[in-house]
Amino acid sequence: MPLLAPDELLSLDKIRGRWIHCERGLLWLTVDGNDIILKSGMSCRVNTQQRVVIQALSIARFAILENPVQQPGARSVRRPRLGRRLLGFSVRLGASPG
């Protein structure tokens, strides 16, 4: 399992169908232009052939897995829910009365 120092970057190719599981720390993933934050215990599935860039936001350890970790909350990279929530939040802020 790779261990990354804060702000260290790792670029991965050809991991379609695999799972990235954050064992420790905080990771920022960029896949197909989508940003995803994984904290300790979270996983996501890579559903693209595109390069995946991983940046450690703290000391972080992660694994690339063939099968998902059996836990609720694992999600697919194809649908970045976090980005949608953040976008929805910013839209609500802009639309609220001053």
Image (spheres, rainbow, N blue to C red):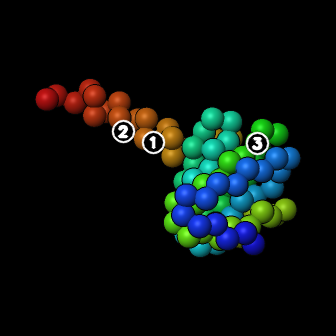
Q: Mark 2 points at which residue?
A: 89
Few, some or many C-alpha atoms within 10 Å of disc 1 (few <14, some 14-19, many ≥20)? few
Q: Let me know if residue 46 appears in the view.
A: yes
Amino acid, disc 2: Phe
Q: Name the residue under label 3.
A: 51
Position of residue 61 in the picture relative to residue 63 (left or right): left
Disc assigned to residue 85: 1
Position of residue 95 in the picture relative to residue 2 (left or right): left
75 and 9: which is toward the camera: 9
Q: Indicate the position of residue 84 as horizontal and vertical percent values.
A: 50, 38
Question: In the image, what residue occupies the spot 86% across and 47% down?
Answer: 14
56 and 49: which is toward the camera: 56
Screen quadrant of the C terminus: top left
Residue contact between numbered discs 1 and 2, judged by CB atoms under 8 Å: yes
Q: In whole angstroms, how far apart are the C-alphas of marks 1 and 2?
A: 6 Å
Name above or below for residue 87 compared with residue 61.
above
Screen quadrant of the N terminus: bottom right
Q: Earlier in the sequence, mark 3 or mark 1?
A: 3
Q: Indicate the position of residue 91 as horizontal and vertical percent values.
A: 35, 30
